[in-house]
Amino acid sequence: MRIVVVYGNHKAQAWRDALAAQLREVEIDVWQPGFTEPADFAVGWTPPPRFFIDQPKLRAFFSTGAGVEHVLNNPNLPADLPIVRIEDAGMGEQMVDYCRFEVLRWMQRRDEYAAQRAAGVWKQLDESYREDWPVGIFGLGVLGRQVANAFAADGFPVNAFSRSNTASEPKVRLFSEANGADQFEAFMQATRVLMILAPLTPATQDKFDRKTLRLLPRGAYVINVARGGLIVDEGLLELLDNGHLNGAALDVFRQEPLPAQHRYWTHPKVHMTPHTAAVTPMVPAAKQIAEKLRRYAADQPITGIVDRSRGY
């Protein structure tokens, strides 16, 4: 078995070494332009268009992240090549911490206290309680489930929206597309903090525009740790400006790095981070990929194979 690692930055060698530590019996190379030695499997992130032309004999592509649009959008991706994605590998815990931090910051009015401090004002603001902060998880996959269950365990009311009605979490109120067209609207109206954790697909592209975000109650908040393409920036900014939304925490953007002139940089209601809410931990991810590679090569079943019709 031969594996080739394709990565768009300096991490290629580190991924190669992490995989080699798990698959000592396997030949693993780092792909560069002009490398045409045939490999059985590829592991990586954002392969360039030329990659699949140079590697026509691949049996599968293993993504080093949970999202796979960076592979699906490749113009030379073979129609029948299986794509396998990472399933958590430690990212869920990071997502929980990120979302929890933002919700507690809003709930405890930390931004307002910081503004008071800067103005030399000593004033206690009204308290708020967890039962008054229903959170809504859009996307109940592996990561979404962890966030939903963590907030339920913390004592927050938790809503979740899923395409199917098969998901079952005992402390989570489930809204399902399969149960009717009115379910999404009801989910949004019941949510004070919307947390977006769904993959970017044709069905979710631009999902949260001005009209959709306005379904949230006045004074609501938005957290996006999925992909920037799910939110229409102009709609979000308009609702932040007119006071319908109180704040947003954004980790992902349509263009990354975010252009210097974008309003998010200076908007007082926006918290921003540079796509760091859940960074793939290399060692546990390499262990997961290695185990799936062994099983796949032996014609044994694995999880994480992408359904291209859904985009995840």
Image (cartoon, grey):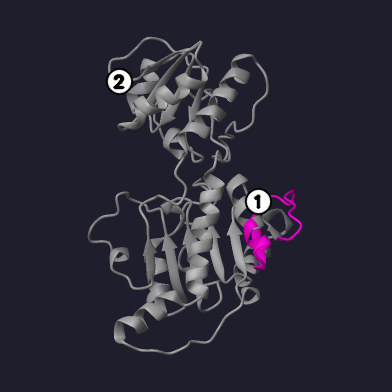
| Whether residue 36 is situated above or below residue 7 in the rendered picture | above
Mark 2 is surrounded, within 10 Å at the Cα level, by few (under 14), some (14 to 19) or many (20 or more) other residues, namely some
Q: Position of residue 229 (x, y in %)?
A: 42, 52
Q: Which residue corresponds to the image point at 50% horizontal and 27% vertical from the top-left?
A: 62
Q: Provide the major secondary structure of the magenta segment.
A: loop
Q: Secondary structure at mark 2?
A: loop
Name the mark on residue 163: 1
- The answer to whether residue 67 is seen in the rendering is yes
At x 46%, y 34%, the residue is 282
Q: CA distance from mark 1 to mark 2?
A: 40 Å
Identity, as a three-letter code, of the amino acid under mark 1: Arg
Does the segment drawn in magenta span residue 237?
no
**Residue 32, disc:** 2
The answer to which of 14 and 78 lies nearer the viewer is 14
What are the residue bounds of the magenta stretch?
150-172
Does residue 101 sit above or below 220 in this rendering?
Answer: above
Q: Is residue 164 magenta?
A: yes
Q: Nearer the viewer, mark 1 or mark 2?
A: 2
Residues under numbered marks 1 and 2 in contact, where contact means CB atoms less than 8 Å apart: no
Determine the secondary structure under disc 1: loop
Q: Residue furthest left?
A: 261
Residue drawn at (43%, 80%) of the image: 243
Residue at 44% x, 44% y: name it: 279
Q: Say which quadrant the C terminus sits in.
A: top right
Q: Nearer the viewer, residue 25 or 66?
A: 25
Task: Tell me which numbered mark, 1 or 2, is placed earlier along the sequence.
Answer: 2
Give me the disc on residue 276: none
Identity, as a three-letter code, of the amino acid under mark 2 = Gln
Which quadrant holds residue 186? bottom right
